[in-house]
Image (cartoon, rainbow, N blue to C red):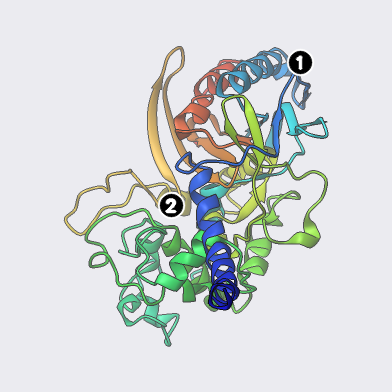
Amino acid sequence: MRTKRWVILVSMPVLLIVVWLAWPVYQFYAHRGEAPMSPFGWHQIEGEVPANQQVFDPRFEQAGSRALALMEEHRSKINAPALSAAVAFGDELAWVGAVGYSDIETQSPATPQTIFRIGSTSKAITGTTLARLVERKAMDLDAPLSRYLPELPNAEWAEITPRQLASHSAGVPHYKENGDLAGLYRTIAMDHHYSDVRDALAIFDESPLLFEPGADFYYSSLGTVLLGAVMSEVAGMPYRQLVQQEVIGPARMTGTFADSDRDKRTDRLATFYYSEGDRFREWRDVDLTHRLPGGGFVSTPSDLARLGTMYFDEDYLSPQTRETFWTPQRLADGEVNEQNYALGWRWREWDIDGVGIARNANHGGVSRGSQCWLLVFVDYTMSMAFCTNRKTEEFIEFGSLYEPLFREFATAGIPPSSP
């Protein structure tokens, strides 16, 4: 009997440690539908949902009303708590709108000022920061990282270039392929805070490259973290301060900051959900500082649209720099990479019914309980962004809203141009 009690006493701490380590992993897979979920903490949306909009240009009054109806139809179709969107032409917002709930439990309506996690749309922020440094000749896209970080924590990084990091051809692994097991766990647990992006290199600095830099394409948010660390070193200031100085401040992005900056969080921040059928459950709290340059920002569609407008301001970025950052990059064999990825942006040319060819630079993002997409249509000097506080099974389920929204505003009397 005493032996049994002793075994129980010894086993309990071990069991607690196992549960403590396993819980974040369970949560990581549960939100993807790959593990059973708790029956507690679920909410449902009942009845008619709120909707609101602001029209800044009277030419878009009717387009805005139709867009709001399209958004509600889409929100219901993808079973999302909220959808928020913004459209800008030139350097000014034209329209913003929101439908649904920022928080289901408190019945708080989503508004155009609601803040969302933007996931990998953060890469457009990082790419724009890099564009500013390149324009000032503070960084050379084709210089080896050893020029900027003489004491690299991984010797294999020495010959990687900023161009390769910004276009995902450096060979740096993505989260799942990270060979640094302690770092891999931390990217799953998402509970460790990194005050400086350079400290976050520790989560993958022992992982080997997947291929020789420039030889292939492999999408890597960790590569963007390395890029952010290099830019921080070059600028001689913390990454957050650099982004504030070069992008957030000039673009007047007042609702954009690092997800982990708790002192900046307000009641404007959406509650983030995963779902099962028509039931929603709040996402657990996470710390995204390990991925800040590649996926750790929060923002509003209005702020993201403002970011897009900056690419049409020649006092901010020259047409030559814009073209460089929106040109799909070639691999060592001369072929354009498989995703038509440029530098911090994807480049697409879509044939849209009723409009024609719509050339655009864009970046979407998926984060814990949230999705966003920013698109900049170059021939229309039009920027469009939309976000939701729920993750769909496939991104395009959420993202397919881009086509009807674009059609409404592109055909509202604004002729295309070639900036």
Q: Earlier in the sequence, mark 2 or mark 1?
A: 1
- From the viewer's perspective, is residue 144 above or below residue 311? below
Considering the image in quadrants, where does the N terminus appear?
bottom right
The residue that appears at 67% across and 29% down in the rendered structure is 81
Q: Mark 2 touching mark 1, by CB under 8 A?
A: no
Which residue is the site of mark 1? 47
Question: Label for residue 75?
Answer: none
- From the viewer's perspective, is residue 69 above or below residue 286? above
Instruction: Find numbered disc 1 in the image and state the secondary structure of the residue it sits on.
Output: loop
Which residue is the site of mark 2? 325
218 vs 385, left or right, is: left
Instruction: Find numbered disc 2 in the image and state the secondary structure of the residue it sits on.
Output: helix
Report x, y in % for residue 300.
69, 42
Mark 1 packing: few (<14 Cα in 10 Å), some, or many (20+)?
few
112 vs 17, left or right, is: right
Q: Tell me if residue 354 can be seen.
A: yes
Q: Tell me if residue 91 can be seen.
A: no
- From the viewer's perspective, is residue 191 above or below residue 382? below
Q: Quadrant of residue 14?
A: bottom right
Cα–Cα gap, marks 2 and 1:
46 Å
The residue that appears at 44% across and 80% down in the rendered structure is 148
Q: In the rendered structure, which amino acid carries the disc numbered 1?
A: Gly
351 vs 69, left or right, is: left
Residue sitting nearer the eye, 249 or 186? 186
